Image (cartoon, rainbow, N blue to C red):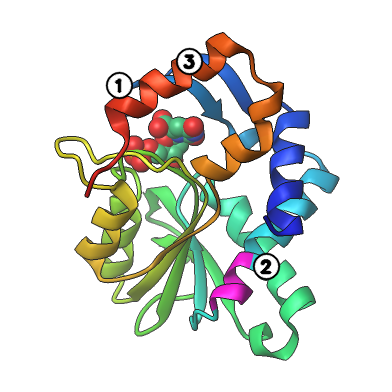
């Protein structure tokens, strides 16, 4: 596992952004673990997160004009990562822009629902936190399309490697096929387990295994 992935999981465990227990997910699934990206909220952990996103993007070689962070959680992620892309990737990323959407459209001043770079005619990389059943991310693709941009991929911190809502298809694969773009990640569920297995109790490992049986993709 690369250093930045390893560091990312270590930080997540240390600040308790990655927790084991019983959690109800957006999809209604009852999960034995939860990843709360919002707890990366101090300068050190945010700097490390930005490094992890930036290194994953640089390693992928993906070409894009704008990093788009859907409201709310994507907003700081886009801002810190675009800065880190320039710091780590240099001139190649010097002109990369960032933008985000407002949840409520503004009808005065500059108006509209996009803050930051105009998306029209631009190649957009979406940045978000977690993918489970792959539902939440659809909205970001819709916003970009409505603004005349072209979504060329998305990057998430954690790919939980689960199925979509009503079939045994992988959520990331479904998103990738639906929009014809790659779905990149910093870490996957497999990375989480590889790194934290030795610290988990027998009961925790069993409930993770039970959960996986239900939602592991077979397509
Ligand atoms: P899906 O729409 O099912 O892919 O759920 C993704 C969203 O669920 C993320 O954007 C988060 O808001 C939230 N989530 C987490 O933050 N961490 C988790 O470990 C799991 C979820 C979740 O509810 O599935």
Mark 2 closeness class: few <14, some 14–19, many ≥20 residues within 10 Å: some
Q: Which residue occupies the extreme top position in the image?
A: 203
Q: Earlier in the sequence, mark 2 or mark 1?
A: 1
Left or right relative to 43: residue 131? left
Where is residue 178 shown, x and y percent of the image? Answer: 20, 62
Magenta stretch? Answer: 56-60
Picture quadrant where residue 179 is located: bottom left
Q: Is residue 18 left or right of residue 115?
A: right
Q: Which mark is residue 28?
A: 1
Identify the residue at image location x=49%, y=83%: 63
Up the image or down, 4 lies above or below 60; here it is above
On residue 206, which mark appears? 3
- Whichever of callouts 1 and 3 sits on the residue coming sooner in the sequence is 1
Q: Does mark 2 have its CB less than 8 Å from ligand 1?
A: no
Give the distance between the C-alpha atoms of the residues marked 3 and 2, in whole angstroms: 33 Å
Q: Quadrant of ligand 1?
A: top left
Seen in the picture, residue 67 relative to 166 is either above or below; the reply is below
Comparing labels 1 and 3, the label whose residue is closer to the camera: 3
* Total number of numbered discs in the rendering: 3
Give the distance between the C-alpha atoms of the residues marked 1 and 3, in whole angstroms.
20 Å
Q: Residue furthest right?
A: 44
Residue drawn at 70 percent across, 59 percent down: 2
Which mark, by number, is residue 55? 2
Residue 50 visible, this orientation? no
Verify whether residue 112 appears in magenta: no
């Amino acid at each position: 596992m690369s250093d930045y992935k390893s560091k990312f999981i270590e930080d997540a465990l240390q600040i308790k952004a990655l927790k084991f227990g019983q959690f109800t997910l957006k999809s209604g699934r009852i999960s034995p673990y939860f990843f709360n990206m919002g707890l990366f909220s101090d300068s050190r952990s945010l700097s490390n997160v930005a490094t992890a996103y930036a290194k994953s993007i640089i390693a992928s070689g993906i070409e894009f004009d704008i990093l788009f962070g859907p409201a709310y959680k994507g907003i700081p992620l886009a801002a810190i990562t675009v800065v880190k892309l320039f710091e780590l990737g240099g001139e190649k990323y010097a002109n990369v822009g960032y933008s985000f959407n407002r949840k409520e459209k503004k009808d005065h001043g500059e108006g509209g629902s996009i803050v930051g770079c105009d998306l029209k005619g631009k190649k957009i990389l979406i940045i978000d936190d977690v993918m489970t059943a792959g539902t939440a991310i659809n909205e970001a693709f819709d916003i970009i399309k409505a603004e005349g941009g072209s979504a060329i991929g998305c990057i998430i911190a954690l790919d939980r490697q689960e199925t979509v809502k009503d079939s045994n298809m992988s959520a990331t694969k479904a998103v990738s096929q639906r929009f014809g773009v790659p779905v990149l990640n910093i870490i996957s569920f497999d990375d989480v387990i590889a790194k934290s297995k030795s610290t988990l109790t027998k009961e925790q490992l069993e409930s993770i295994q039970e959960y996986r049986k239900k939602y592991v993709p077979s397509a």
